[in-house]
Amino acid sequence: MGKSYQKQWTGVFGDPVDDNPTVVMEQAAFDAAGIPMEYLTIQVKKGDLEAAVQGMRAMNFTGINITMPHKGEVLQYLDEISESARIMGAVNTVYWKNGKLAGENTDGKGFLKSIQDGEVPIKGKKAVILGAGGAARAIAVELADAGIKTVTVINKNKAHGQALADIINTKTNAEGVFIPWENSVHIPEDTDILINATPVGFTDDKKPDIVYEDMKAGMTVCDVIPNKAWTGFLLEAKEKGLRTFNGLQMLVNQGAIAFELWTGEPAPVDVMREAMEKEYGVELF
Ligand code: NDP
């Protein structure tokens, strides 16, 4: 066989997309695995998504990540959607499955993998999620799928919070409860897993406005904030000696799942984690 100059393409469609760091870990993974694949960070403006998906089909892309503002709209341009992504109404990873262009959502699965790797019990347990946006929705659906008993959503916007509780109640086997978030909010005493799924802590050291005395022995505390190992929220839990899981591990795990969907090979998770640690200048624990 002669030399091949051809590469396989994958990447991300979004807008804005310039600050999306996924290329760092996926490219490191492809290079480490010796796969001739290139990850492109591509600006696709609102209104251009259908053409972009047609383009990736025509150019035989191996797959693509989808980010804001396209995660919902993309469903209609795909051949097949996983059940959990359909319930969430959001796809973040597109890949080929038996000749069909399929949509999956790896965000909640990445979260789930973190706590499952840590052998945190889920079946029959009670979770509380702060926030009701895309990350909250993905985590809630995957926790329900893994057998959680109750997901309580605490959110400022009542319509958003109630809508997520309704999804849990009507589309999963778990019970969904909504608590409006007014001022400093109390966390139910019987909470097993507490998750911050708001962006609070991403750009500064702020913490979600909850009553921190309610973080009690036995709780597992998780954050989705991907650019630091220790957010103020997780530090509160650490001071109380509670188990913690950070958003950087979740980010790496969701990227690892995408890698596996695209390549059919196990992801070099350590390589991906090291690449992100270096990028963010933090060390995971
Ligand atoms: P969305 O915009 O979809 O949702 C944000 C949610 O947070 C909303 O429910 C909003 O409430 C709530 N919120 C925003 N600001 C505050 C505040 N000051 N106090 C209380 N609640 C607040 O965002 P996403 O769900 O897509 O993303 C949320 C975070 O998750 C981001 O920081 C993102 O980086 C992170 N993320 C991490 C991933 C990972 O792999 N680690 C994967 C995906 C996301 P309201 O409804 O009242 O407006």
Image (cartoon, grey):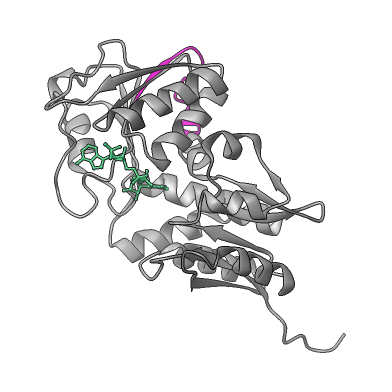
Identity of the residue furthest to the right in this view:
1
Q: Nearer the viewer, residue 140 or 47?
A: 47
Identity of the residue furthest to the front in this view:
47
Magenta region, residue range? 115-128
Q: Residue at x 42, y 28 (%)?
A: 164
* 51 horizontally vs 21: left or right: right
Location of residue 5 with respect to 274 vertically, above or below: below
Q: Is residue 127 magenta?
A: yes
Q: Residue at x 31, y 34 (%)?
A: 131
At which x and y percent is residue 4? 77, 85
| Any part of residue 265 in sight | no
Location of residue 238 with respect to 64 vertically, above or below: above
At which x and y percent is residue 252? 46, 51
Location of residue 190 with respect to 78 vertically, above or below: above
The answer to which quarter of the image holds residue 62 is bottom right
View quadrant of ligand 1: top left
At which x and y percent is residue 87? 56, 33
At which x and y percent is residue 40? 53, 73
Q: Quarter of the image containing the C terminus? A: top left
The answer to which quarter of the image holds residue 150 is top left
Q: Nearer the viewer, residue 266 or 184?
A: 184
Q: Nearer the viewer, residue 91 or 28?
A: 91
Q: Residue at x 66, y 40 (%)?
A: 82
* 239 horizontally vs 118: left or right: left
